[in-house]
């Protein structure tokens, strides 16, 4: 039986398509951004391959970072599932790109323009129906844009309309494609998408490549399961503790109002505590899997200091 094509949303496949094919990468970027054409002539992918192409490498945040001709920095990231604090995280990483490019003694004039492209397989922005939202700094009252320093592009795959024939919508449909028929139809829309489909066909037929891709997908799903299990356990324990505290508070006051107030306060406090316990459990599991500390921070929303302390305590136990 013929196996179905690998998904371009898989981290290994994504890197192979866009990290190693400048023609494909350029076509995608031109569909998203409004940079001068000359900027794409000197594209340089900084990390074209996965940090490790082996099954033992359990997890990585999927992104491709590159320089344009004038050394502006672009980072492309894809998210399959919604993550808590995703807005704060994307702002943090975009700002961090500016800081990382600054060198001691350099003037502010040399700081690059940084661009983040976040592709989501879920609806993130519910305020409008557009599948491409570009965020830049500007004054809401005067509608004056701040001189370019950073921008965040959000591309939401579920919002693409079938009657939209733009190249960007074709690319997002490419990410959503699942069958050979889907990919074949999209490959007719442009040579770049046809080339990307060729990479998927090659990888899908290669047993070694398929094993790597499937193992990394399993690792991603395992991490999602860790997070959800920890969250549910934390909520359950928090609610139980909150109910107990609420009842005790109510009995002490001896009035229905006191019991209701105590229950509400106890539930809130207990749920907050439970959520934190859930995050700590996810962090412990992730550290046992030897994930990088920054990845654990991104997954849980804990501070780097908290994760470092947790990692230290786990080492002491061994």
Image (tube, rainbow, N blue to C red):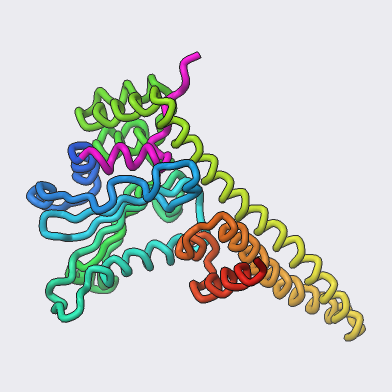
Q: Residue at x 27, y 69 (%)?
A: 100
Apparent side of residue 3 relative to residue 49 in the rendered image (left or right)? right
Q: Could you tell whether 91 is left or right of 195 in the image?
A: right
Residue 285 in percent (x, y) is at 61, 57
| 19 or 175, nearer to the observer | 19
Residue found 34% across the figure and 24% down from its top: 201
The image quarter in which residue 253 lies = bottom right
Residue 14: quarter of image = top left
x, y percent for residue 241: 80, 70
- Residue at x 48% of width, y 50% of height: 59
Horizontal side of 224 relative to 243 (left or right) equals left
In the depicted structure, whether residue 175 falls above or below residue 287? above
257 left or right of 40 in image: right
Q: Main secondary structure of the magenta part?
A: loop
x%, y% of residue 289? 56, 54
Query: Is the C terminus in the top left, top right, bottom left or bottom right quadrant?
Result: bottom right
Q: Is residue 127 above or below residue 205?
A: below
Q: Nearer the viewer, residue 208 or 137?
A: 208
Q: Is residue 272 magenta?
A: no
- Magenta residues (range): 1-21
Q: Looking at the image, which residue is at 39% across and 52% down? A: 128
* Figure quadrant of residue 315: bottom right
Q: Position of residue 87 (x, y in %)?
A: 43, 62
Using the rendered image of the protein, determine whether residue 130 is visible from the camera's viewpoint.
Answer: no
Give above or below for 36 relative to 104.
Answer: above
Query: In this orientation, does residue 94 appear?
Result: yes
The front one of 52 and 205 is 52
Tell which residue pokes out farthest to the front in this image: 318
Q: Is residue 8 magenta?
A: yes
């Amino acid at each position: 039986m013929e196996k179905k094509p690998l998904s371009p949303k898989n981290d290994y496949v994504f890197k192979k398509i866009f990290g190693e094919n400048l023609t494909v990468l350029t076509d995608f970027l031109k569909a998203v951004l409004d940079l001068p054409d000359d900027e794409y002539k000197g594209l340089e992918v900084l990390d074209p391959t996965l940090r490790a192409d082996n099954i033992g490498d359990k997890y990585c945040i999927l992104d491709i970072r590159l320089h344009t001709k004038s050394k502006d920095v672009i980072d492309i990231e894809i998210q399959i599932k919604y993550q808590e604090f995703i807005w704060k995280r994307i702002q943090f990483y975009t700002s961090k790109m500016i800081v990382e490019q600054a060198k001691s003694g350099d003037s502010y004039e040399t700081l690059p323009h940084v661009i983040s492209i976040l592709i989501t397989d879920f609806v993130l922005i519910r305020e409008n129906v557009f599948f491409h939202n570009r965020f830049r700094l500007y004054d809401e009252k005067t509608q004056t844009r701040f001189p370019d320093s950073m921008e965040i592009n959000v591309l939401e795959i579920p919002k693409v309309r079938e009657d939209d024939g733009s190249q960007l919508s074709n690319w997002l449909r490419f990410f959503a494609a699942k069958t050979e028929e889907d990919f074949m139809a999209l490959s007719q829309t442009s040579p770049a998408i046809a080339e990307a489909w060729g990479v998927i066909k090659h990888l899908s037929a290669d047993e070694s490549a398929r094993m790597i891709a499937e193992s990394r997908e399993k690792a991603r799903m395992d991490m999602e399961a860790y997070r959800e299990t920890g969250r549910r356990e934390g909520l359950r324990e928090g609610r139980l503790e909150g109910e107990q505290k609420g009842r005790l508070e109510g009995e002490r006051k001896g009035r229905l109002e006191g019991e209701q107030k105590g229950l509400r306060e106890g539930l809130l406090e207990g749920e907050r505590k439970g959520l934190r316990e859930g995050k700590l459990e996810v962090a412990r599991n992730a550290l046992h899997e030897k994930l990088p500390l920054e990845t654990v921070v991104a997954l849980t929303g804990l501070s780097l200091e908290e994760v470092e302390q947790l990692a230290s305590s786990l080492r002491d136990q061994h």
